[in-house]
Image: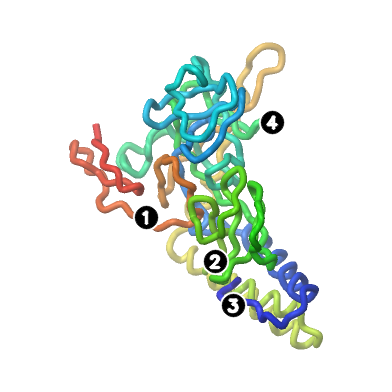
Amino acid sequence: MLSITPDPGISTELAQQWTQFCNTRLRYAWSIWDWPELLVTQERAFRPVWRNDQNYFANDELYFLPTTSYYKAIRDVIQGDPPTDTNFWAPITQVDKYIGYDQMGQQPIGEIFGVYNINPRLFPSLQPPGIKFRPSQYGVDVSPFSGPTVFINFKIPFQKLTTDPWVQATYQYGQSVFWTDGNCYAVGVASTTAPPSDTTQWYQIPLPSVLAEYVKTAAAGDAADDQAAEQTLLAESEEYLHQEVNRLMGQGQAHYYSLRRPQRYHFPYGLGGFWWSVSGPWTGGFVSTLTDALYSPLPQDRRLVLADELGDAVVTETGQEILVQ
């Protein structure tokens, strides 16, 4: 954690106390600025993507990548049985277009800045207009005038760090552990007995390097017994944050920071009408396309070339060639 492996001789109580300090400081730093490392754009389906290593139960709904269609289980389904098997699955003809904030197999969604019908990075000169969205009890509702998938620009939500070590046991979706490589991992599938080194079952809880020095220094200040040392360390930690914010503002982030928040508009309908958030212009960043693999929270952009919009083959983040129309 924070590039420091906990001392095996440290007491459980002290380790938990330090972890609480780190989580408190990390949550604060996470929320005060739109750190570029935490802003991503991901292609998302309106239901979880079918995976051949998962069991499904009656009434489960999912998205099947090969047919770009949605299906509903009509009975319990063992892993490996594809949605094209009509003995177990039925197509969904009218999809309720919402995306869960914590969609199994995908990076949890935090604050949303925009939703787009096309990959905004592949067509940068088009300035793709965003589509309307709004929060609901299911997650985020998306305008019905959209395709089978959309691209969501959002901020990765804060997730707590832990010092609980992995032990051989069955872990459920969302449970987190500390692993021997010094990082924290969370389960991204329904359940698993595999160790966190299996990235098809676990994903790494992100800790951006831009916040690491602040978190370490501020947590040390919170833990200090001497008041003078505490004040010195906390002042030093705040200076780390100010330096990072000033660095980003110097590169122009202050210009578009206020533009990122989507505007809300009231649309008259029925007796009371309703509110929609209207997506702002896309401001760049990492874009990932949809796969059935467990998503890594902070991947590197592996695109080999940008789209030139002339019909040339483009290699996406997944390594799959697509043709720009």
Question: Mark 4 vs mark 2: which is more N-terminal?
Answer: 4
Q: CA distance from mark 4 to mark 3?
A: 39 Å
Q: State the CA–CA distance, disc 4 to disc 1.
A: 33 Å
Q: How many marks?
A: 4
Residue 85 at x, y percent in the picture: 45, 21
The Cα atoms of the two marked residues, 2 and 1, are separated by 23 Å
Q: Nearer the viewer, mark 3 or mark 1?
A: 3
**The C terminus lies in quadrant:** top left
Q: Which residue is mark 3?
A: 4
Pointer 2 residue: 245
Which numbered tag is attached to residue 301?
Answer: 1
Say left or right for 136 vs 283.
right
Q: Tell me the kind of residue under disc 3.
A: Ile
In x, y percent, where is residue 276? 60, 28
- Of residues 84 and 299, the one drawn nearer to the viewer in this rendering: 84
Question: What amino acid type is highlighted by mark number 1?
Answer: Asp
Do callouts 4 and 1 mark residues in contact (Cβ within 8 Å)? no
Which mark, residue 137? 4
State whether residue 132 appears in this view.
no
